[in-house]
Amino acid sequence: MGGFTSILLDVALPLLYNLYKYWGRYFCGVVIFDAPHCEIHGNEVISLVKYNGKLSEYDLFLELEAFSEGRSCHAWRCFGAHPCQKDGQEGYLFRVWAPNARQVCVFGDFNGWDENAAPLEKLEGGIWEGFLPGLKRYDTYKYVIHAADGTVTAKADPYAFHAETRPGNASKIYELDEYPWGDTGWMDYRAKNPPYRRPMNIYECHLGSWRRTGEGEFLSYRDTARYLVPYVKEMGYTHVELLPVMEHPLDASWGYQVTGYFAATSRFGTPDDLKYLIDQLHQAGVGVILDWVPAHFPRDAFGLYHFDGTPTYEYADPRKGEHPDWGTQVFDLGRNEVRSFLFSNAMFWLEEYHADGLRVDAVSSMLYLDYGRQEGAWMPNIHGGKENLEAIEFFQKLNTTIFAAHPDVLMIAEESTAWPKVTYPVDEGGLGFNFKWNMGWMNDICHYIKLDPYFRQFNHRDITFSLMYAFSENYILPLSHDEVVHMKGSFLGKMPGENHEKFAGVRAFYAYMLTHPGKKLSFMGAELGQWNEWHYEYSLDWHLLQYEPHRQIHKFFQAANAFYLAEPALWEQDDSWQGFQWLCADDHTANTVAFLRWDREGRPLIVVCNFSPIHRKGYYVGAPFPGTWAPVLNTDAEEFGGSGLGDAAPIKTVSAPCHDQEQALSIDLPPMSVMVYRCIRRSPVRKKKAGEKEPEKKRAPRTGTGKAAPAKTAARKSKAAARPGHKPKTDQA
């Protein structure tokens, strides 16, 4: 009998369930698993709800099993508060993981916050469960955790979908399965258009300070949609990246001290309101990336810290479990239930909120056991090294799981070291992300732009070194929020010189970023020419647009973004040497670089960057073939606030060796500018007549204050075809 029962449970039940799941509605005309509620008789769960947010009985069994084994990616459907019926009464079923608790109760407005009024039953695996009748949406609640040592602590629900607005910190009852999404067109487009051969220009945004009311109050998610959606569309951004929108108690943390991992912050409205904002962006053709923080969590007493009275979500050993610099706790990535929590949370934002990707914060802090720790204050791994082997495995499983379910999303690592193969597939030894922030490029550029032009010649590598490794990973070039705070200066404020020189510097360096290989990200406010550093308590300085210089820089950002989107040479091959070729990388005394960008059809753009205040008229730059080349972007144009110097009419090449090319252009290169040229008419190469001697070719003269020395072009390398989810990296710079 026991063997028969085992066969029934292991084989027959799953088979019958799946037969019904896929065929029952067609042959029986009954849809049991589409019922809006679960049914409970006594302590037995008969059926839970469908896939769209909750589970059938059999799926519940599988999900709880996966949770305890560290394989769950939909734990939010099991845990938290879910509507159900028991003995004909409407109410909510609560489920929470607290393995070392002596007792767990639920209290809230509905029972007068009585700590002992609603005890839960302990199940296997440290899970507590119970039904409370008569509750409704927006009712507040917490778990009362009676620890083994006798202490009693009130905890917010780790899986709550909604929470009180600060300073309150209780959880709120909320269901997520009612929002009417209208972004089917966008989701179909996303699935058919992988990001690797598409432009990506990301607008990084902090919702609390992008724009505020006249009284300085937050805009709601829905009010933000009213202004943000048309703005980013008009400005030419392809994506918006939101600093963390998960619930957090402290505005000053910018959202990175998360206490409600499954709750959209109530500062700006309800979960449905955030869905509305994302939906509206999608309908406008703009993707949405969310900052995600699996590296650490704060020590707030109501949060995850010592959840059951002992280290539950964090490492017990303080040498692994604490970030001394941040005063936060580190998730125990070796614990099955914690991995399930994080896997599920990542999947939650992708599925329930239709996020197009996650930017994973502080990856380096997770990969290194000695991160932020003094010698002797960290514990080596089993091999004696400083690598966190559990974190490596976590990222590999996370990305494998995510891309198996959603091959078209973005998993972006904020990784600030030279950790190898961050964006390589897992089966090639990589971490499995499909993009990585290029922090080295950002640090070099931010150092370079602050220098007086005279001293830039001694730091020329700051603008060229990135090409030594530009194709070793799938990179995003960030100019992020971290670079415009804490006395670092705004993007405009970093520039040396008089005001007109500062604005010219912004235009030049932004154009350099747009033409440099890699996807793009810039933090809000740069496009306004904001003088002040970003501050989370205040709106951007939108009033600056009443002044001509700021209107002009705003117009420049719009035009430059449009140029980037329209030029396949700037994004079709921005992860390969096939899309980039140095013309001149070593004209350091002139603070000048020149290079080619190629599209997949073999059509180039010539890019020349002058980061000095010197006007270089008659500057020679190599051209890949003879013809007529037209200026298509001039950052010094008068309409952008420039001096109006630079070429306005097309230029013909001359037959003169320059920069390892047989042809050259003599250009008018304005001070502190970027000029971009496109060939509009290609000239045929004249064939030699029989007996005709090869004419002696003149070499293009030196120009400016430095030499236009030839720079060797790196050999172009081929790449393997992209895999679903993320592209293999076979190039090494």
Image (cartoon, rainbow, N blue to C red):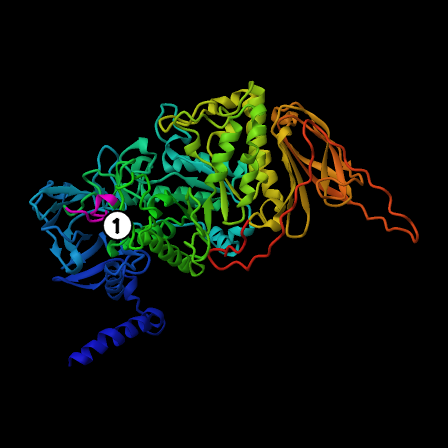
**Residue 56: percent from the left, percent from the top?**
26, 63
Q: Residue at x 28, y 52 (%)?
A: 333
| One can see residue 585 in this view | yes
Q: Residue at x 21, y 38 (%)?
A: 300
* Left or right for 433, reference 43: right
**Residue 297: percent from the left, percent from the top?**
27, 42
Label 1, on which residue? 332
**Residue 84: percent from the left, percent from the top?**
20, 56
Q: Amino acid at mark 1?
A: Asp
Q: Residues within 10 Å of mark 1 (few under 14, many from 20)?
A: many
* Secondary structure at numbered mark 1: loop
- Which one is nearer the viewer's eye here, 303 or 167? 303
Residue 316 position (above or below residue 11):
above
Q: Residue at x 46, y 52 (%)?
A: 423
Q: Residue at x 32, y 73 (%)?
A: 19
* Left or right for 305, reference 18: left
- State how many labels appear: 1
- Which one is nearer the viewer's eye here, 140 or 339? 339
In the rendered image, the residue lying farthest to the top is 498
- Main SS of residues in magenta: loop
* Left or right for 431, reference 596: left
* Left or right for 629, reference 6: right
- Which one is nearer the viewer's eye here, 310 or 264? 310
| One can see residue 139 in this view | no
The residue range painted magenta reads 310-319
Q: Quadrant of residue 558?
A: top right
Q: Looking at the figure, which quarter contains the N terminus?
A: bottom left
Q: Based on the picture, tell me whether residue 525 belongs to the magenta stretch.
A: no
Q: Quadrant of residue 497?
A: top right
**Residue 67: percent from the left, percent from the top?**
25, 58
